[in-house]
Image (cartoon, rainbow, N blue to C red):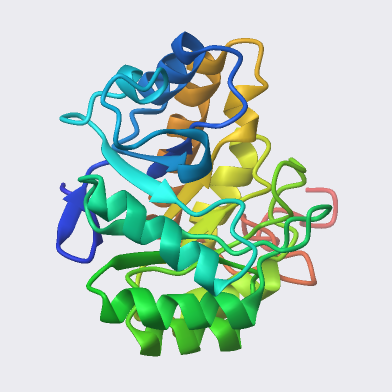
């Protein structure tokens, strides 16, 4: 049965988005992308020359196979983020952008006010905007009302590998969402991805966990299976958590005073 993932007007078979930073080599990056079965890969605009088809890293990404999703990593305010997105489009990239505004160099937490400001401008400019945000349900609603194509709440700060520490807030975002919810950042193990998908996230984005793995290709494959397992569990319907024990077998009819 088809279970495609749709953002704006494009559908994908994979619910695992992959970042391209931190890899020890371009070959390791490609192995991770292939292992993950990814169809969307995000690239930091500050790291590449999008106007140069011979750019060392971009030349390793098959643009026919992967949707290249430029991101504005490193932008400190809305003005910088908008400028980067417009430069990418002018260089021939699809008008899609992962919007990141992270003025804090230590924790890389997204600035909610500047993110919303940039999103409103880019949506008016015709971009398909995928904003990276803290797990803030109120901000998520404002961004959706502004016309973003997704919301991308963090599970934990970028690169920490701590997992879904914002579980309760993400649950609220998912409950109220009218666009796909992509859990981004902090997912350090396949089990973290499965947890996010079991919560009802539409997809996850992973980078550091793949880049620092001893075998990035194998780790990509492990995340792929975890995403599929988590999605399958969510669709099948998980049982509710209970405080008290509840036997799965009847407790009557077999204790008869020693007979």
Q: Is residue 200 visible?
A: no
Hey, which quadrant is residue 172 in on the image?
A: bottom right
Name the residue located 47 percent from the left edge and 19 percent from the top edge: 29
Hey, which quadrant is residue 82 in on the image?
A: bottom left
The percent coordinates of residue 56 (x first, y second) are 40, 17
The percent coordinates of residue 161 (x first, y second) are 74, 40
Name the residue located 33 percent from the left edge and 28 percent from the top edge: 37
Name the residue located 45 percent from the left edge and 37 percent from the top edge: 18
Q: Relative to residue 213, is residue 65 depicted above or below?
A: below
Q: Relative to residue 19, is residue 56 depicted above or below?
A: above
The percent coordinates of residue 185 (x first, y second) are 62, 50
Relative to residue 142, is residue 96 drawn left or right?
A: left
Total labels: the figure holds 0
Could you say which is closer to the camera, residue 249 or residue 154? 154
Name the residue located 38 percent from the left edge and 58 percent from the top edge: 85
Could you say which is closer to the camera, residue 15 or residue 244? 15
Could you say which is closer to the camera, residue 239 or residue 182? 182
Relative to residue 159, is residue 115 drawn left or right?
A: left
Could you say which is closer to the camera, residue 148 or residue 192? 148
Q: Relative to residue 213, is residue 105 depicted above or below?
A: below
The percent coordinates of residue 15 (x first, y second) are 36, 46
Q: Is residue 209 visible?
A: yes
């Amino acid at each position: 049965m088809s279970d495609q993932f749709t953002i704006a007007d494009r559908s994908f078979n994979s619910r695992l988005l992959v970042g391209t930073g931190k890899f020890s080599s371009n070959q390791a990056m490609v192995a991770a992308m292939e292992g993950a079965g990814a169809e969307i890969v995000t690239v930091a605009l500050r790291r590449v020359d999008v106007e140069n088809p011979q750019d060392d890293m971009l030349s390793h990404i098959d643009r026919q196979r992967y949707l290249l999703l430029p991101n504005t990593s490193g932008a400190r305010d809305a003005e910088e983020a908008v400028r980067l997105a417009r430069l990418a489009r002018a260089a021939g990239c699809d008008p899609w952008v992962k919007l990141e505004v992270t003025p804090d160099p230590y924790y890389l937490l997204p600035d909610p006010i500047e993110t919303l400001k940039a999103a409103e401008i880019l949506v008016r400019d015709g971009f398909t905007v995928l904003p990276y945000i803290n797990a803030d349900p109120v901000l998520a609603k404002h961004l959706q009302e502004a016309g973003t194509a997704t919301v991308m709440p963090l599970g934990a700060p970028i690169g920490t590998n701590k997992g879904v520490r914002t579980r309760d807030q993400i649950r609220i975002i998912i409950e109220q969402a009218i666009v796909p919810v992509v859990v981004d950042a902090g997912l350090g193990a396949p089990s973290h991805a499965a947890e996010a998908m079991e919560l009802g996230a539409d997809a996850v984005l992973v980078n550091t966990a793949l880049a620092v793995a001893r075998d990035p290709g194998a780790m990509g494959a492990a995340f792929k299976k975890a995403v599929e397992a988590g999605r399958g569990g969510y669709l099948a319907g998980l049982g509710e958590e209970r405080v008290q024990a509840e036997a799965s077998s009847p407790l009557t009819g077999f204790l008869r005073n020693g007979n």
